[in-house]
Image (cartoon, rainbow, N blue to C red):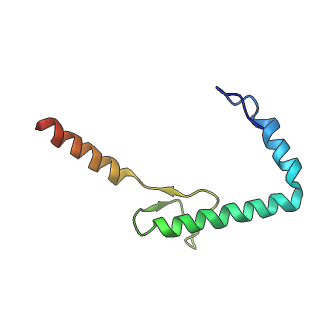
């Protein structure tokens, strides 16, 4: 399956088709894997980046959002240095 090349016209039928094909058990298994994978990635990246939006117990849901603001500041500083040369 594929969506529209320049838009999201097929987002609802595609999502519905995936859910219908997986069934309740498959959807539960899929969600568990998403959460497990996201927490694994967050755990590995937490040594190098701040993880945003963690719960009280330190876990995240299905998305791993890292804080890249320090990288943006470093890139801006390097650009200023290079422009002054």
Which percent across, then down, holds residue 7?
66, 27
- Compared to 73, does 59 lie above or below? below
Which percent across, then down, holds residue 72?
33, 47
At x 40% / y 52%, what residue is drawn? 68
Which percent across, then down, holds residue 27?
81, 57
Q: Residue furthest front?
A: 1
Which percent across, then down, holds residue 14?
79, 39
Q: Is residue 49 left or right of residue 39?
A: left
Q: Is residue 15 left or right of residue 39?
A: right
Q: Which of these two is toward me, 57 or 74?
A: 74
Determine the image quadrant of residue 10.
Answer: top right
Number of labels in the image equals: 0
Q: Residue furthest bottom?
A: 57
- Compared to 82, does 56 lie above or below? below
- Compared to 70, does 2 lie above or below? above
Q: Which of these two is toward me, 53 or 68?
A: 68
Whether residue 60 can be seen here: no
Whether residue 44 can be seen here: yes
């Amino acid at each position: 399956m594929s969506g529209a090349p320049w838009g999201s016209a097929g987002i609802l039928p595609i999502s519905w088709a995936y859910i219908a094909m997986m069934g309740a058990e498959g959807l539960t298994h899929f969600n568990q894997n998403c959460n497990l994978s996201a927490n694994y990635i967050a755990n590995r990246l937490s040594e190098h980046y701040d993880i945003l939006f963690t719960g009280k117990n330190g876990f995240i849901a299905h998305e791993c959002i890292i804080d890249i603001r320090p990288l943006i500041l470093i890139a801006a500083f390097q650009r200023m240095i290079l422009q002054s040369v």
